[in-house]
Image (cartoon, helix red, strand yellow):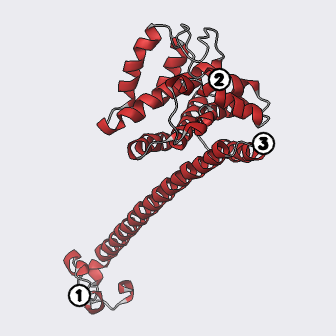
Amino acid sequence: MQLYKKAGVAVSSSRLAEYRLPQLYVHKLNFENFSLDVQAGYIEGLKEIYTSYKNTAESQKQNSEKEAQEDVFDLLGRLYEKLGRTPTPDSLQHLLRGVTEFIDSTIASRDMVNLIFARAKQQRGVQQKAVSNLLLALHYGRQNNFSRDDIRNMALSAFLQDVGIYRYLGKRVSEEEIQKHPEKSAMVLERCNIQNDAIKYAVLEHHERLDGSGIPYGKRRLSSFGQLVGIISEFYGIYSENSVRDVRPIHIFQYMKQDVQDQKFNPELFKQFAYSLL
């Protein structure tokens, strides 16, 4: 608007900053400088507006994504609890549909991994462990470019490994009975008519070890998914138990290295999983 005022008074940057423009006039000799000053001030103003808008939008986006991730945790936990308490073909199919849709629509995200570690500090439980193991398997599969079907089977194996343990919640049981929970979990999948052998073997083998020291059978020959779910289960179990001490994943891997050296875990598989999180 000032560019069209009558000539008469020169404009300084200080007077522009004072917002005294309606009282100012532009001298003909200073018109070019005045135009440049106004243009520079206008551009600077746009930059400030854009920066403020961008920061606000990014903050809102991050909050929205975090809330969505929290909702995913809670939803998958509820589906898992329903299957554990009422193990029927219908409850399993409902869970499988929800989990498969989530797996297909989710990308490998470091934010999701960070959420796993953050939630481990806040709460523990069967559902918490199940959802965390699913996300760790999903992240590993995506980071290593596995096929869609393999990622789905790995994630479901990690998710369902302890579903048979629901029968023990709130009850006093022997250590021997607890050690049979892989069998109980496999029985739940059988009862629910799950047909995928890769998932059933992984659930049955997740506490077996390559040196024969695992449970429940002391097997030495294990499926690849069984070995992976075993590594994930061991990693998350140690992490959740030590999360109050602010232990980092690298510390857990250093601790687990002894088991690798003792030939309990496949060294290459262990290294791939560790690299996916570091």
Identify the secondary structure beneath mark 1.
Answer: loop
Please identify, in this view, whether the residue under mark 1 or under mark 2 is nearer the observer.
Answer: 2
Q: Is residue 97 left or right of residue 141?
A: right
Q: Note whether residue 67 is visible.
A: yes
Q: Residues within 10 Å of mark 2 (few under 14, many from 20)?
A: many
Q: Which residue is mark 1?
A: 9
Could you tell me which residue is drawn at 19 percent across and 77 percent down? 14
Report the quarter where the C terminus lies.
Answer: top left
Q: Nearer the viewer, residue 238 or 3?
A: 238
Residue 184 position in % (x across, y down): 65, 29
Residue 221 lies, in percent from the top left, at: 64, 9
Quarter of the rendering containing residue 206 = top right
- Quadrant location, the N terminus: bottom left
Residue that extends furthest to the left in the rendered view of this protein: 14
Q: Tell me the element at label 2.
A: helix
Residue nearest the viewer, comparing 164 with 4: 164
Looking at the picture, how far across and down is residue 27, in whole percent? Answer: 26, 85
Answer with mark 1 or mark 2, whichever residue precedes in sequence.
1
Where is mark 2, residue-wise?
Answer: 204
Pointers 3 and 2 in contact (CB under 8 A)? no
Q: Residue 99, how many percent across, how many down?
A: 67, 44
State the separation of the CA atoms marked 1 and 2.
88 Å
